[in-house]
Amino acid sequence: MDGFSLRGGIRVAPKVGGGVRADSGWPMARLRADSNSIELREIWAGTLVITADNLIAIRRCRNTGLEFEVSDRDELWMFRALNADRVVNRLAALGWTTER
């Protein structure tokens, strides 16, 4: 199976208007990725499934995070990891492009 899974933190915030819907640190969130989808899961935020069809952008966010924006949600999901560069490289190896 191609892909990987790792734990981290998550922050979920509306695209407009400010505020935070969920914010938890390591190890409360999990990112699972393969060449077809990326799944972010956290107990209070729920699950976000990202595919080529709904992906708007994956962006670097500060030194430790990646921000995921999709077309079917009005929120931004930020996954925090100990080494964001490693996550970016592993996603790139699966064919996902991250804005730097």
Image (spheres, rainbow, N blue to C red):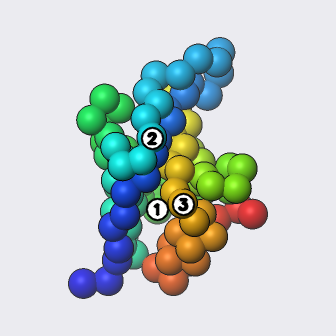
**Identity of the amino acid at label 1?**
Ala
- Dot 3 and dot 1 residues touching (CB under 8 Å): no
Asked whether residue 81 is in view, the answer is: yes
Which residue is tagged 2? Answer: 25
Q: Residue at x 62, y 55 (%)?
A: 64
Nearer the viewer's eye, disc 3 or disc 1? Answer: 3
Look at the numbered disc 3 and give the secondary structure of its residue: loop
Q: Are there few (<14), some (14-19), or many (20+) residues within 10 Å of tag 2?
A: some
Mark 3 or mark 1: name the one nearer the start of the chain: 1
Q: Are there few (<14), some (14-19), or many (20+) residues within 10 Å of tag 1?
A: few
Q: CA distance from mark 3 to mark 2?
A: 11 Å
Q: CA distance from mark 3 to mark 1?
A: 26 Å
Q: Residue at x 70, y 56 (%)?
A: 63
- Dot 2 and dot 1 residues touching (CB under 8 Å): no
Mark 3 or mark 2: name the one nearer the start of the chain: 2
**Identity of the amino acid at label 2?**
Gly
Q: Nearer the viewer, residue 53 or 12?
A: 12
- Count the labels in the image: 3
| Rendering coords of residue 96 (x, y %) | 53, 71
Q: Quadrant of the C terminus?
A: bottom right
Q: Residue at x 34, y 77 (%)?
A: 3
The tag on residue 82 is 3
| Rendering coords of residue 82 (x, y %) | 54, 60
| Rendering coords of residue 70 (x, y %) | 51, 45
Nearer the viewer's eye, disc 2 or disc 1? Answer: 2
Q: Are there few (<14), some (14-19), or many (20+) residues within 10 Å of tag 3?
A: some
**Identity of the amino acid at label 3?**
Leu
The tag on residue 52 is 1
Asked whether residue 49 is in view, the answer is: no
